[in-house]
Image: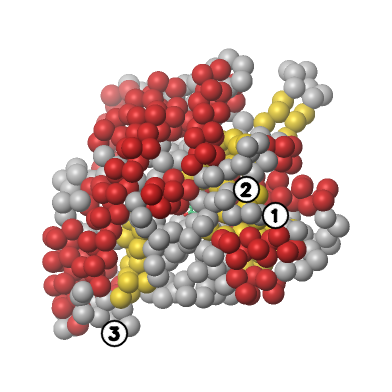
Amino acid sequence: MRNSRFPALSRSWEDVESEMKTARERDMPWRDARNFKPAYFGGEDLLAVADGALNMYLAENAIFSRTAYPSLGQYEEEVVDMMLSLLNAPDGAGGSISSGGTESIIMCVKSAREWARENRSSAATPEIIVPHTAHPAFDKAGHMLDVKVVRMAESTEWRADAAAMAEAVSGDSFMIVGSAPPYPYGETDPIAEIAAIAREHGLWMHVDGCIGGCILPFMRRLGEDVPDFDFAVPGVMSMSIDLHKFGYANKGVSLVLLRDAGLERYQRTSFGDWPAGIYSTANITGSRSGGPLASAWAVMNYLGEEGYLRIFAAQRDIKQRLMKGVGEIDGLEIIARPHALHFYFGSPEFDIFAVDTGMAAKGWSMTRAEQPDSIMMWVNMSHQDVVEEYLGDLQTTVADVRAGRVQPAEKSTVYVM
Ligand SMILES: Cc1ncc(COP(=O)(O)O)c(C=O)c1O
């Protein structure tokens, strides 16, 4: 028998809270001293709006958004509509919310698989074709749905290798994927080219816009050179869009968007023979908090197109200042042409992870990546006033690395484990 770890006696909230505060403080002892902000930080006002709405609906169960809590149903419809119009969806398009990018992707693979069962000749092992950089959520989906994931061996010039994807199409393929943009490298895949392959072979084309779905439409309006990536591209059947990233909602809300609302029948699970009544949901989760959806609706109404344009313009400028400064440091190179608000840099001359180690010692928290070894930066509003300080520290750290005064602490680049 295991020893019970369940506390035998009740404790006061003050006691529990104090233990939790200490544990949280240990995560990042420098959190308060450095005024730490979440990765997707658009401003204190956004945090207040998102948290206010989250708290208002925290205890409401979003599974009952069409029955007990119709206001949540209304928010879902409106949030879906707002994003469909932003992403050039045609009349008749539809969508639903999920708990995150991974769930959205799993549901799109599931919808495409069911659609293929009805519309394509049967496959011994149904396959989806994904670029080298596609998010591992596609592999999770493949594992859960018994679908083979054919992942390309490499990217060409930091984007999906469309020629290799065309060659990979077989009689068992039913879906093809591009990302706008992917997490690695940050450059949008050639969506129009991949969609042309989809049209030629009758495949379901999915665009993973978990990062860029909210950003890219506004980058275009700001005059940035962003390739076509949304429902304006013929053949794009579905998109996954995370509102809990650059939509600035609290964690736990993403969108599954479909070119044709009728396709939702392939996504939905309905069960009628249950004493409690009909059970019909579009996504995986059952009970879940209404808070994240409420926070998305609140932030989208608070910002409007005007507000998103304003904060994306400001962050685009921060990104440009950072990229220019990094590119001017001898031995550092920017990787790819990043379309969203994250970018990578590396060095053909010295160990970039030593630079990371040196910068960490100066208090800068950055993210390591590989293929090639590189440092990844998420730009957010908290960086506005520290660009010069960061670049100055980067310059001295590079000089220290060149002179052998800093060694890398370790090579590992774990994303999540
Ligand atoms: C491009 C892309 N797609 C999908 C996901 C998965 O999203 P989530 O972590 O919300 O499940 C991520 C996460 O970073 C991502 O960057």
- Residue extending furthest toward the right: 121
Task: Specify the amino acid type for callout 1.
Answer: Trp
Q: Which residue lies furthest to the top in this view?
A: 68
Closer to us: 334 or 392: 334
Circle 2: element type: strand
Q: Does 71 appear above or below 54?
A: above
Disc 3 to disc 2: CB gap under 8 Å: no
- Circle 1 SS class: strand
Please tell me which residue lies in front, 43 or 364.
43
Mark 2 closeness class: few <14, some 14–19, many ≥20 residues within 10 Å? many
Is 86 on the left-hand or right-hand side of 391? right
Q: Which of pointers 3 and 1 lies earlier in the amino acid sequence?
A: 1
Q: Which of marks 3 and 2 is in front?
A: 2
Binning the other alpha carbons within 10 Å of mark 3 as few (below 14), some (14 to 19) or many (20 upward) gives few
Q: Name the one closer to the observer, 296 or 368.
A: 296
Disc 1 designates what residue? 204
Residue on which disc 2 sits: 238
Give the residue displayed 73% in from the left and 64% down from the top: 200
Q: In which quarter of the image is residue 364?
A: bottom left
| Nearer the observer, 370 or 407 | 370
Q: What residue type is labelled 2?
A: Ser
Which label's residue is closer to the chain start, 3 or 2? 2
Q: Is mark 3 within 8 Å of ligand 1?
A: no
- Residue labelled 1 has its Cβ within 8 Å of some atom of ligand 1: no
Q: What separation in Å lies between label 3 and label 2 (alpha carbons)?
A: 42 Å
Check disc 3 and give the amino acid type: Glu
Left or right placement of residue 156 versus residue 358 in this view: right
- The residue where tag 3 is placed is 349
Note whether 57 is above or below 84 in the view shown. above
Q: Do the residues labelled 1 and 2 touch (CB within 8 Å)?
A: yes
